[in-house]
Amino acid sequence: MNYTITVRAGNVLGGSDPSLTENTTLRAVTTGVPQFVSLLQPINNLTWNEVDCSRRNGLITGYTVRISNNSITYNLTSTERHIILNDLVFGTVYNISVAATNSVGKGPFSDSIVVEIGIVSSPVESVSSIMDTTWAVISWSVPSYIPSDHPIITYEIGYHMFQSGNCSIVDDVDVYYINTLALNQNVSCGSTFTIITGLYSDTCYIFGLRPYTDNGYGAWTFITSETLTLQSPTMSIHIPSSPTPCTCISTSTSSGGVIAVGVLGGIWLILLTVIVIVHVYYFLRMQGLLTAQAKTDEDIAMQVCTPYDLHKTEVPSKENERAYEECEAPPDAATDDSIYDL
């Protein structure tokens, strides 16, 4: 590649005339290889990372993918850092590697990965999240298809903050970081949830989840969620209009005072009830005594009249009546005849 280099000296008074030189760099293929080649089943999406910048020897214009098995080897090309492999046969073992290409030619191939097609589980299903300010609970259901001879060993969880501003849009950059950089933790196959801590409040996150068997990883399943806003504590301060004495009472003291006032009030009500009962009792008793006294006086009056009535009934004969009349007559009414008769 041709380059033009300009050099000029300068001081406080100004700069000199520029000096120009032209140079041509050597043309060479890239010496670096793509890194982190991986195949995501069951969609068979092959992905890889860029070549190290210091070993590109120019602009990378494309990639060559080499696929081989026991009977065939063939190449595919791509201008992106991923490709869908549609011609892979179920149950077949493949060796896959990738080489970068610049304007000069194709560089070396990466180390091959060995994969067997069609025996990894399907993606997890029903992924959901519960978000707080600094933590999240991610839950899911098991994949609908799990090979009987290749059970799930673990689930791999990854997450990172959004590169884009919209929390509902996932782009290739977000998926790239999940796949290569932001692996967070592994969860045992018997669990269907995990707790992720250390998050930032009021921030959008993308969470990725995929199952892993002894034959490789299943496809990623993504979910986007936003942490809650951290609420700052509020404080109300009362400033009095004029400086007045202030008595500080703790919560425990106030509670004790309320309890004491309640006890004293209860005792006062009890005493008041007793006093009322005593007064009612004495009032009823006095009423009973007055009634009994009136009845006693009436009995005494009847007893005074009773002998007189009995005296009158004890003189039924005519002789007694005559004697009674003579006793009632005045003394001068008596005659000598009545004396002799006696």
Image: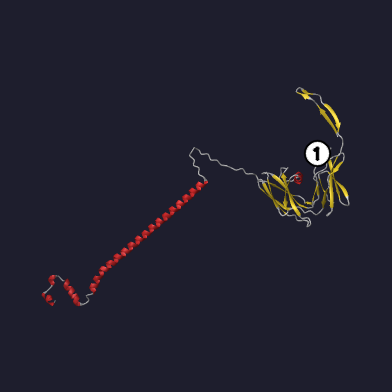
Q: Give coordinates of residue 98: x percent, y percent.
A: 84, 45
Callout count: 1
Name the foreground residue: 249 vs 215. 215
Q: Nearer the viewer, residue 306 or 254?
A: 254
Q: Is residue 322 above or below residue 86?
A: below
Image quadrant holding the C terminus, namely: bottom left
* Quarter location, residue 235: top right
Q: Position of residue 255 (x, y in %)?
A: 50, 48
Q: Is residue 143 left or right of residue 249?
A: right
Task: Give the residue at x 41% y 56%.
Answer: 274
Q: Position of residue 323 (x, y in %)?
A: 17, 74
Q: How is the image coloured?
A: secondary structure
Instruction: Give neighbour class at mark 1: few <14, some 14-19, many 20+ (Cα, 10 Å).
Output: few
Residue lying farthest left?
A: 336
Q: Residue at x 24, y 72 (%)?
A: 310
Write down the quadrant of residue 340 in the picture: bottom left
Can the viewer see residue 115 in this picture?
yes
The residue at 83%/26% (across/down) is: 19
> In the structure shown, which secondary structural element does the residue marked by tag 1 occupy?
helix
Specify the quadrant that holds the N terminus: top right
Locate residue 276: give its quadrant.
bottom left
| Amino acid type, mark 1 | Cys
Is residue 243 left or right of 300 when viewed as pictured? right
- Kindly identify which residue carries mark 1: 53
Asked if residue 88 can be seen in this view, the reply is no
Q: Position of residue 307 (x, y in %)?
A: 24, 70
Furthest-top residue in this view? 13
